[in-house]
Amino acid sequence: MVRFSAEDFRRILTKIRGLKARVYFYFKDFKYLLTIDGLVRARDKNFDVVSWSIVFGSKAPHEVLNSLNVEKVEVELKGELNPLIFNSIEEFLKWLTQSSS
């Protein structure tokens, strides 16, 4: 399992912003998502923004990714109709590294 530091998450955020992509992290047995769409937000399954502190408490984004099991990661790229779907955080990171190099 991948462990993230705050710096790791900042690098991911920078790459996602550079790609002008939206990323949705779905967690197993959890009704909220962590999303990156320029900003890092908590959303419910209807994609409505919800209060970060209500959903994740005082956890930073990298702590959320370290503490919850990622079910899948969806990436929406600008100009593409269908999202890319990754079944693990490792698959997503491999794609992100390849697409931004």
Image (cartoon, helix red, strand yellow):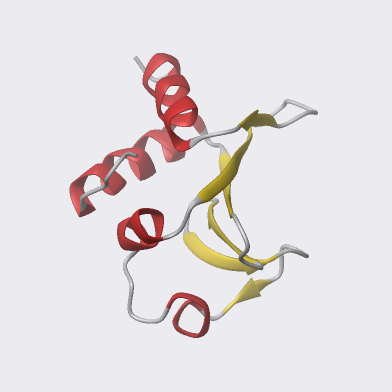
Query: Splitting the image into 4 quarters, where does residue 94 fall?
Result: top left
Q: Position of residue 34 (x, y in %)?
A: 52, 59
- The vertical placement of 53 against 64, above or below, is below
- The vertical placement of 13 against 20, above or below, is below
- The vertical placement of 101 against 9, above or below, is above
Q: Position of residue 18 (x, y in %)?
A: 42, 33
Q: Residue at x 26, y 47 (%)?
A: 4
Q: Residue at x 44, y 40 (%)?
A: 17
Query: Splitting the image into 4 quarters, where does residue 47 fall?
Result: bottom right
Q: Position of residue 66 (x, y in %)?
A: 34, 55
Q: Residue at x 37, y 61 (%)?
A: 67
Q: How many marks?
A: 0
In the displayed structure image, the side of residue 90 where residue 28 appears, left or right: right
Q: Is residue 17 visible?
A: yes
**As rendered, which of 21 and 5 lies closer to the eye?**
5
**As rendered, which of 87 and 5 lies closer to the eye?**
87
Q: Is residue 77 visible?
A: no
Q: Residue at x 54, y 81 (%)?
A: 51
**As rendered, which of 6 and 4 lies closer to the eye?**
4
- The vertical placement of 54 against 46, above or below, is below
The N terminus - image quarter = top left
Q: Position of residue 24 (x, y in %)?
A: 59, 48
In the displayed structure image, the side of residue 34 where residue 14 appears, left or right: left
The C terminus - image quarter = top left
